[in-house]
Amino acid sequence: TQLLEQSPQFLSIQEGENLTVYCNSSSVFSSLQWYRQEPGEGPVLLVTVVTGGEVKKLKRLTFQFGDARKDSSLHITAAQPGDTGLYLCAGSSGNTPLVFGKGTRLSVIA
Amino acid sequence: NAGVTQTPKFRVLKTGQSMTLLCAQDMNHEYMYWYRQDPGMGLRLIHYSVGEGTTAKGEVPDGYNVSRLKKQNFLLGLESAAPSQTSVYFCASRKQGIQPQHFGDGTRLSIL
């Protein structure tokens, strides 16, 4: 069974601080996705990474896929209250359903 | 563009009652999924479908049944609801390949 471990589980920071959340596995994934979920809504895709070592930027968010395609990180620069939410990583291997991590709940305090 | 629509949004049931949750997508997606989300447990896959007329079990299928009679609809049934099935249920769909999953806004189900 493939598992994705996310850390930290909870994170509360002040506006303007930087942060990194991690998504780790002992399994290799063909691609990895990051989603953000806000209260009362379903998760929404932020990014997909498919190549080992790949780095993608989305405004103040930087996503990296590990060289061995077993792990990923999400770095947020100068966090804003609008970044508050549940961040989920999800890995894919071939045609099997996505494997989701349990999420990192981020709270950015103004 | 409605995307993925779940009905109902809220429901309270008594133990032993049955009900069906409906998921409809208007994006012509092949794959559809039902998840439950519980505090500290993340998203757990209940059942999924890779095309019209097909279904498969996920991680936590017991107590649930599904049907995909039409490509755009994926139904989740609870035959005899139990308090352990109190949860938020999410439906999702996607195209084939490395594609994003599009989620509905969830159904909040409480079983007393």
Image (cartoon, helix red, strand yellow):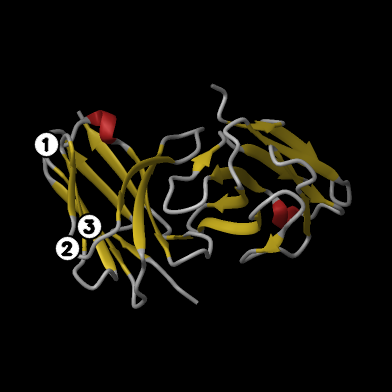
User: Which residue matches tag 2?
Assistant: A53
The three-letter amino acid code for the residue at tag 2 is: Gly
User: Which residue matches tag 3?
Assistant: A73
Task: Name which residue lies at 71% across and 57% down.
Answer: B84
User: Which residue matches tag 1?
Assistant: A78
The three-letter amino acid code for the residue at tag 3 is: Ser
Q: Chain of mark 1?
A: A
**Helix, strand or loop at mark 2:** loop
**Helix, strand or loop at mark 1:** loop
Q: Is residue B34 left or right of residue A60?
A: right
State which mark lies toward you, 2 or 3. 2
Between A55 and A76, the one nearer to me in the picture: A55
State which quadrant residue A23 falls in. Answer: bottom left
Q: Which mark is residue B3?
A: none
Task: Name which residue lies at 65% across and 56% down.
Answer: B48
Q: Is residue B38 left or right of residue A39?
A: right
